[in-house]
Image: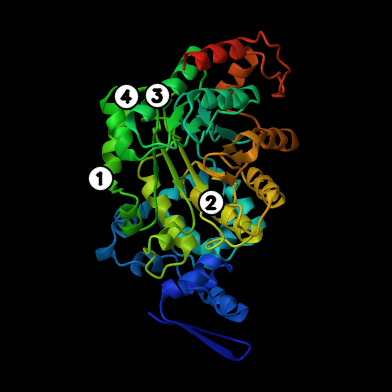
């Protein structure tokens, strides 16, 4: 179906809805690399005029990637909740934007609406929004998940403690973990990216992190972020697996490039649930299973796998959230600037992408976090990351990453530090997961207001971690 509009006596035509979506996107290097971005600002605005008048129902009738060719498209359309969709089913994309920004769209209404929205719908409406609109709506989306603590409560923000080490040295991992805990980080997860794919090494890392959590009775979860097939083998061998991690994308071909299918993720989710390691329990609706999955995504992954099918990178990213939503994950985050300037060229593009991803994920009902990051060859710096993390924290970010000194010495990229999280808490009044905060106070690491206390060398965490590191 072709789309047309006229602006200031100049006519614009678009071949299909996929092209309208791509050309309505804010400018970014990945879309130009793919050859789908608008050629001029006028063409971009024309596409937005057209998109504003597209009925939301059109996305159920005109698939951007054909149903027959892509299992993510099939998942999106087959799992669509027509009853949940009814409150907005009569709207265009532009009307939906105005409705989202209005008083009727309360947190309770948005929670009920989420199963009725498709990734393409939320990606479309995001293209009509300013940054402040993305923040205002995402802030109203409350998504609560649980494993050993409660994440996503309004007014709270968690931190993934990321103790990566370039050689997976257990003493180095223990030192970084101690650093993070003493600065009040780790309530989202103690999550390590291993340098090795060796199952014995992965098992040692899992046992170390589990020993830390169990020995000190920390109400958090641990995860070694290895491929899902490795995690399945580790579960079979009896390793202490809390969460199953996997990077995912928004098309079938992208996921195949990662070595992942929905059937494989189904198997892994069932295996993790069978471990019964969660202690808090319940999903965001107050009942059901604990949340056991952790996913990471990032704009540009589909194009880098030659698997975008002419769809813009932000819409491909949002489609990944449909796959994540199937598993009711404990955590999901966009690693927003990690792939590089070929996809998000500079600080401005990274900031916009981070706000878009957070908005789309939260509107689809996901516990959305963000790795506020950039690579050293991007036209970005830590000032840009400061801007993005403040904007995301204001928007109700579920969690961000904590790396010693904001410099990941294993993955060689720039992220956010434990001190950045402390700044956000003090500036915006954000709390930690309540169970984790209570533990910090029992351990005399934080005070009643959540501030970090000075500790003596005889503190039990310092002494105990020292022993664990030596035994490792």
Give the mark toward the camera: 3 or 1.
Answer: 3
Precedes in sequence: disc 1 or disc 4:
1
> Residue at point 58% right, 66% down?
128
Give the mark toward the camera: 3 or 2.
Answer: 3
Task: Identify residue for label 1.
Answer: 263
Q: Residue 368: x percent and y percent?
A: 51, 44
Task: Identify residue for label 4.
Answer: 275
Question: Is residue 237 found left or right of 445 in the rendered image?
Answer: left
Q: Which mark is residue 151?
A: none
Precedes in sequence: disc 3 or disc 1:
3
Q: Which mark is residue 338?
A: 2
Precedes in sequence: disc 4 or disc 2:
4
Mark 4: secondary structure = helix
**Tag count:** 4
Question: Is residue 308 found left or right of 155 in the rendered image?
Answer: left
Task: Identify residue for label 3.
Answer: 204
Rendering quarter of residue 43: bottom right
Can I make out residue 400 in this image? yes
* Residue neighbourhood size for the residue with mark 1, other residues' Cα within 10 Å, grouped as few (<14), some (14–19), many (≥20): few
Task: Check if mark 1's residue and mark 4's residue have beta carbons within 8 Å.
Answer: no
The Cα atoms of the two marked residues, 1 and 4, are separated by: 19 Å
Give the mark toward the camera: 2 or 1.
Answer: 2
The Cα atoms of the two marked residues, 3 and 1, are separated by: 28 Å
Q: Nearer the viewer, residue 85 or 161?
A: 161
């Amino acid at each position: 179906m072709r789309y047309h509009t006229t602006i200031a006596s100049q006519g614009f035509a678009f071949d299909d809805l996929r092209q309208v979506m791509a050309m309505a996107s804010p400018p970014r290097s990945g879309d130009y690399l793919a050859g789908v971005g608008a050629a001029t600002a006028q063409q971009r605005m024309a596409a937005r005029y057209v998109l504003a008048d597209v009925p939301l129902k059109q996305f159920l009738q005109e698939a951007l990637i054909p149903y027959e060719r892509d299992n993510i498209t099939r998942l999106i359309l087959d799992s669509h909740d027509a009853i949940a969709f009814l409150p907005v089913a009569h709207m265009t994309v532009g009307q939906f934007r105005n409705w989202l920004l209005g008083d009727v769209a309360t947190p309770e209404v948005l929670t009920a609406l989420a199963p009725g929205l498709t990734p393409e719908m939320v990606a479309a409406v995001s293209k009509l929004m300013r940054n402040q609109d993305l923040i205002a709506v995402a802030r109203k989306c409350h998504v609560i998940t649980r494993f050993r603590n409660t994440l996503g409560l309004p007014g709270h923000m968690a931190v993934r403690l990321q103790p990566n080490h370039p050689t997976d040295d257990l003493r180095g991992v223990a030192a970084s973990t101690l650093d993070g805990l003493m600065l009040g980080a780790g309530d989202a997860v103690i999550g390590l990216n291993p340098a090795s794919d060796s199952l014995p090494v992965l098992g040692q890392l899992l046992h170390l992190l589990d020993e830390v959590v169990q020995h000190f009775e920390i109400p958090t979860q641990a995860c070694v972020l290895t491929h899902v097939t490795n995690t399945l083998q580790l579960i079979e061998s009896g390793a202490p697996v809390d969460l199953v991690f996997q990077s995912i994308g928004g098309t079938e071909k992208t996921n195949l490039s990662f070595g992942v299918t929905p059937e494989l993720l189904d198997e892994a989710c069932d295996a993790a649930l069978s471990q019964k390691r969660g202690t808090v329990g319940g999903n965001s609706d107050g009942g059901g299973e604990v949340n056991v999955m952790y996913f990471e995504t990032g704009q540009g992954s589909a194009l880098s796998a030659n698997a975008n099918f002419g769809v813009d990178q932000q819409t491909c990213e949002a489609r990944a959230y449909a796959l994540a939503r199937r598993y009711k994950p404990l955590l999901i985050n966009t690693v927003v600037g990690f792939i590089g300037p070929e996809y998000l060229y500079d600080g401005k593009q990274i900031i916009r992408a981070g706000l878009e991803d957070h908005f789309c994920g939260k509107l689809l009902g996901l516990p959305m976090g963000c790795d506020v990051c950039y690579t050293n060859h991007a036209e970005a710096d830590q000032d840009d990351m400061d801007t993005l993390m403040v904007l995301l924290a204001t928007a109700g970010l579920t969690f961000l990453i904590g790396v010693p000194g904001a410099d990941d010495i294993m993955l060689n990229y720039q992220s956010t530090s434990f001190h950045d999280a402390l700044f956000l808490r003090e500036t915006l009044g954000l709390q930690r997961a309540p169970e984790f905060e209570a533990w910090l106070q029992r351990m005399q690491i934080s005070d009643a207001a959540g501030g970090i206390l000075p500790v003596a060398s005889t503190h039990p965490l310092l002494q105990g971690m020292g022993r664990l590191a030596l035994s490792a």
